Amino acid sequence: MNSQDEESPRILQVATAQEGAIVFADICESTRVHETAGDSAAYALNERSLEVMRKATERVAGTVIRTQGDGMLCTFPKAAAAFTAASEMQSAHRGETLRITIGMHFGPALSGIGGDVYGDAVNLAARICSLARAGETLQTEQTVTLLPPLYRRCTRLLDTATLKGKKDPVNVYLMVDEADTQATMMEPATRAPAARTSLALELRYRGEAVKLDESRTKAILGREIGCDLVVNGAYASRQHATVEVRRGRYVVTDQSTNGTYVSDGRNSKFLKRESADLGLSGTIGLGAEPENDASGVVEFEQIQSGGGA
């Protein structure tokens, strides 16, 4: 190579962004398992968990980018493939000692040294994963909109989150599975009797009321204008909880990030993406206990179906 070539400036190769589904999966409570089962057993469980996730990824033409301690980063060409892999990962961990959290986002990622990926889309998937509880898969709206209708029906809007580094709030969706929607009931002593057709459930908040009966079986509570009962609580989510008539019972289901507090005046229960029967009367606290934040308290009462609002 001549001197002119040696003195020429180096030409930098610009990485191109390629769109795809980015999935972060983290193993939960591995530290506790190390303490209770010992290092050898915990290591074996951890490796088995990572192998399950690797096989689920490769089965749908996904790529394992890297494993790092208790986590795995994967990419998929299609949102549906990522959804399928995530569902298989969670199913394989259900009932096991170790459980996982998963975060998904569809967007452009840059290729780095050794096949690694980086960029805003990768960071967003990691932050979505950090919001999940054990056994949950969370997705951004960009991912959900690209899913086939059959898959999209297995998601629901969980909340709108403000994430570090993002100017605008991000809509976060939860992957819904039949096993994840089982109701958590109140104690037998306080469990409500089956709702009779002559009764209705009235929900009240600051002078506004909604009545549930055989003609109207579901109401959404939250701070979003489109909710059936708009609750301007300091800790309320956009669509915080639903109350519905279910097989002759009145049931409240939390779908928020801060949780829902249900009280009948004697007993109280904290719900985190769970369900509970409502008694004859009481309060529902959106995001905080009623005594700590009165701004998010909804009153409920079973009334004669001919009365109320």
Image (tube, rainbow, N blue to C red):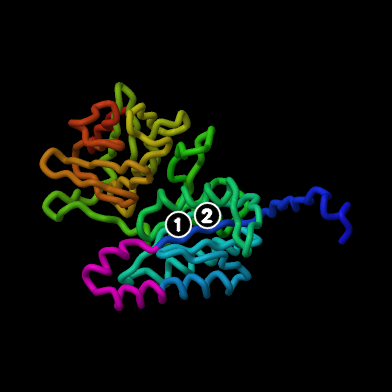
Q: Quadrant of residue 300?
A: top left
Q: Is 30 positioned to the left or the right of 152 in the image?
A: left
The amino acid sitting under disc 2 is Met
What's the CA distance linking mark 2 and mark 1? 8 Å
Q: Which residue is mark 2?
A: 104
Q: Quadrant of residue 50?
A: bottom left
Q: Answer above or below: position of 222 versus 10.
A: above
Dominant SS of magenta comes to helix
Pick out the residue farthest to the front.
3
Task: Look at the numbered disc 2 and give the secondary structure of its residue.
Answer: strand
Could one spot residue 282 in this view of the protein? yes
- The quadrant the C terminus occupies is top left
Task: Look at the numbered disc 1 and give the secondary structure of its residue.
Answer: strand
- Local crowd size for mark 1, using a 10 Å CA cut-off: few (<14), some (14–19), many (≥20): many
Q: Answer above or below: position of 250 versus 82.
A: above
Tell me which label, 2 or 1, sits earlier in the chain.
2
Residue 164: mark in rendering: none
Residue 246, position as x, y percentages in the image: 33, 51
Is 213 part of what is drawn in magenta? no
Residue 137: mark in rendering: 1
The residue positioned 40% from the left and 31% from the top of the image is: 223
Q: Are marks 2 and 1 in contact (CB under 8 Å)?
A: yes
Query: What's drawn in magenta, residue-wise?
Result: 27-48
Residue 96, position as x, y percentages in the image: 33, 72
